[in-house]
Image (cartoon, helix red, strand yellow):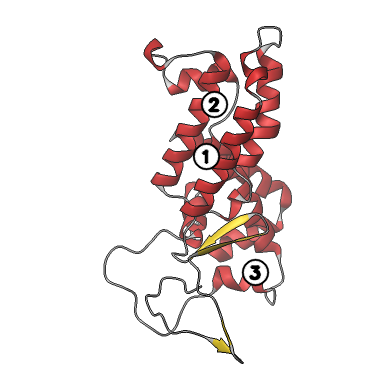
Amino acid sequence: MRVNRQTKVQITIGEQTVEDIDEFTYLGSTVSNDGGSEADVRCMIGKAAGVFQHLHRIWSSTTINTGIKMHLYSTIVIPTAIYASETWRNTKRIAQKLNVFHQWCLRQILGILYKDRITNEEVLQWSGLWKLEEIITERRMRLDGHLLRLPDKRISKAVVHWTPTEGKRKQGRPKTTWRSTFIADLKTIDIRSLDEARDAAADRTRWRALVAQCTKECGRN
């Protein structure tokens, strides 16, 4: 696989030609050659939709109360839909896909039709659940804190801080990356530099408060 490259040069080891693919699955996540998260999000939503449909008798049951249904949904379907989501970059397109799926599921469980003219905010209020964006933001911020507390020699931390010193960026607007998403998260809690973020993450109690603040800000948007 070549990420963001059009070259088709074949690689041969001995007499065996290495297969060139567009995407593959690694530890349950889909890795694609565009370097983005859309393929993984699409795959996870598809898996979650399959799980949701498999439990359709529970959602349509009149003998199971709504609280139990929501608990099952939040512990079975949602974790499937947002598996490894802390590693996703945050784009409007991804947020929209997740929101559409989440709302569709909640309306099915609550028996709400779109013609009933019930807003998405009202659906969330009735369900007692967060937006998927909020859950993902919380998970990503927790991962951020973990990375910031790692020793500088760890590769996962070096990747966050590393900036290319050679080469040229393609023309046009830069793509949203995990790092730019990470920096945007920090800005919502008034942290303007990685050094400041590292100091904040060192205090776990303070960082937990910042995670809650960032998640709350995400819920307002």
Give the left or right position of residue 49, taking residue 121 as reference: right
The residue that label 1 is drawn on is 133
Q: Residues within 10 Å of mark 3 (few under 14, many from 20)?
A: few
Above or below — where is 136 with respect to 182? above
Judge by depth and name the residue closer to the eye, 149 or 44.
Answer: 44
Q: Residue 26: which quarter of the image?
A: bottom right
Instruction: Give whichever of 62, 124 is nearer the camera.
Output: 62
Dot 1 amino acid type: Glu
Total marks shown come to: 3
Gap between marks 2 and 3 measured at Cα: 35 Å
Residue matched to label 3: 156
Estimate the x, y position of residue 57 in percent, counting from the top left: 66, 18
Q: Which of marks 1 and 2 is nearer the N terminus?
A: 2
Judged from this view, the residue extending furthest toward the left is: 172
- Residue in view at x 58 percent, y 56 percent: 87
Q: What element carries label 3?
A: helix
Amino acid type at circle 2 is Cys
Q: Where is residue 185 in the image (x, y as percent from the top left)?
A: 51, 51
In 3D space, how far apart are the residues under numbered discs 3 and 1 (Cα atoms)? Answer: 24 Å
Mark 2, Cα crowd under 10 Å, few <14 / some 14-19 / many 20+, is many
